[in-house]
Amino acid sequence: MKRLTTIALWTITLTICFGFGAAQAAEMPDPDPIAERVMEAFDIPGMAVAIVKDDELVFARGYGVLEAGGSEPVTPETIFAIGSNSKSFTSAAANERQEEPKKK
């Protein structure tokens, strides 16, 4: 479970890092070397990276394999379990919703 959480967090981190400041997909830095370093540093067999800019998907790629020692590749469509992270997302969304001005 801890490995899946780490994979999800790094996927989100890479998405945020590359998403800001990239005006066009053509101007975006190459995420391949960074993804490969992250996978090696954290001993992750595979991960998916998606970058969204102005509500449009500008980059999606899978890296590595689904399971260590396996041969099934990770694709942009691979679904990863995010474990208890959904609780944090839900509480942040609820807090944001609460802070919105009430519409009359």
Image (cartoon, grey):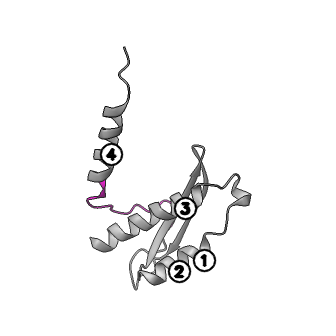
Q: Earlier in the sequence, mark 4 or mark 2?
A: 2
Picture coordinates of residue 10, whole percent (x, y): 44, 67
Magenta range: 75-86
Q: What amino acid is labelled 3 in the image? A: Cys
Which residue in the protein does label 1 denote? 33
Q: Dot 2 lies on which element?
A: helix
Q: What amino acid is labelled 1 in the image? A: Pro
Residue located at (71% from left, 53% from top): 24
Picture coordinates of residue 70, whole percent (x, y): 41, 82
Residue located at (33% from left, 74% from top): 3
Question: Left of 59 or right of it: where is 71?
Answer: left
Circle 2 or circle 3, nearest the eye? 3
Q: What amino acid is labelled 4 in the image? A: Ala
Which residue in the protein does label 3 denote? 17
Q: Earlier in the sequence, mark 2 or mark 3?
A: 3
Q: Earlier in the sequence, mark 1 or mark 4?
A: 1
Question: Left of 87 or right of it: where is 39?
Answer: right
Badge 1: residue crowd in 10 Å (few <14, some 14–19, many ≥20): few
Dividing the picture into quadrants, the one containing residue 21 is bottom right
Disc 4 to disc 3, C-alpha distance = 20 Å
Q: Dot 4 lies on which element?
A: helix
Q: Earlier in the sequence, mark 4 or mark 3?
A: 3
Which residue in the protein does label 2 denote? 37
Disc 4 to disc 2, C-alpha distance = 30 Å
Which residue in the protein does label 4 denote? 92
Taking the view exactly as shown, the residue that stands out farthest to the bottom is: 69
Q: Quadrant of the N terminus?
A: bottom left
